[in-house]
């Protein structure tokens, strides 16, 4: 094989995994946060997961009344915002990309819509919104949580 080509291939092999992990590191935010802020994010994620479980059980039982407070809780669950100091907020502003903030806002908006649909006892709309929320979890994790969920790397659902 031509020497130049061998060199080129070697260079590609050495540089590709490196380039890839750089990209992951940039968009994955967990490892960029100071530990105490990352803990708050995890706490919020776990609270959201519990609410989603409860909502699912209420949805398949037609118990609209139980969907309302849980969906509302997700909407109001800015645990991070509530427990952060001013210095923390500043750090977050520096670390969080605009895209993450938009995804977070869109997600919280969906939960408000879900609470509203449950108040109106609109079964079909609740299911649709629940699905949209699941899609939002996955999409954000694929984009910003790869250092916590490395298996998502090869998946291509979400956006
Ligand atoms: C706007 C972005 C975003 C959305 C939306 C989002 N997450 Fe997350 N989530 C993250 C990030 C970032 C992490 C990784 C944190 C870390 O690296 O420690 C995470 C981590 C988690 C974890 C792991 C917590 C742990 O114990 O380490 C769970 C569980 C979770 N999310 C559930 C959900 C569920 C369920 C939804 C949707 C109903 C959701 N998330 C929506 C960004 C998001």
Image: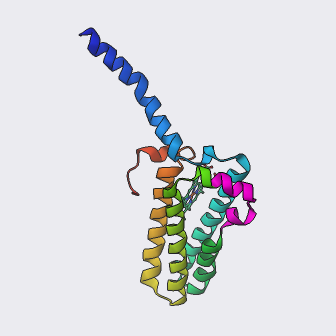
- In the rendered image, residue 39, in percent from the top left (x then y), is placed at 70, 53
Q: Residue at x 66, y 65 (%)?
A: 47
State yes or no: residue 48 in magenta.
no
Q: Residue at x 50, y 90 (%)?
A: 120
- Figure quarter occupied by ligand 1: bottom right
- In the rendered image, residue 82, in percent from the top left (x then y), is placed at 72, 66
Q: Quadrant of the C terminus?
A: bottom left
- In the rendered image, residue 37, in percent from the top left (x then y), is placed at 70, 53
Q: Is residue 53 left or right of residue 125?
A: right
**Residue pushed farthest bottom?**
120
Find the magenta span and give its range.
78-92
**Residue pushed farthest left?**
2
**Which one is nearer the viewer's eye here, 60 or 10?**
10
State yes or no: residue 82 in magenta.
yes
Q: Residue at x 46, y 75 (%)?
A: 129
Q: How is the image coloured?
A: rainbow
**Which one is nearer the viewer's eye here, 116 or 126?**
116
Q: Residue at x 58, y 69 (%)?
A: 53
């Amino acid at each position: 094989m031509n020497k130049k080509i061998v060199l080129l291939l070697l260079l590609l092999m050495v540089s590709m995994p490196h380039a890839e992990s750089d990209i992951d590191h940039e968009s994955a935010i967990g490892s960029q946060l100071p530990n105490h802020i990352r803990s708050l994010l995890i706490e919020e994620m776990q609270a959201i997961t519990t609410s989603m479980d409860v909502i699912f059980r209420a949805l398949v039982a037609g118990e609209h009344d139980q969907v309302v407070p849980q969906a509302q809780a997700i909407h109001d669950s800015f645990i991070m915002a509530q427990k952060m100091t001013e210095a923390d907020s500043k750090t977050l502003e520096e670390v969080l990309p605009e895209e993450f903030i938009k995804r977070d806002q869109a997600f919280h908006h969906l939960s408000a819509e879900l609470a509203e649909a449950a108040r109106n006892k609109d079964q079909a709309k609740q299911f649709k919104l629940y699905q949209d929320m699941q899609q939002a979890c996955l999409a954000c994790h694929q984009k910003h949580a790869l250092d916590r969920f490395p298996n998502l790397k090869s998946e291509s659902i979400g956006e």
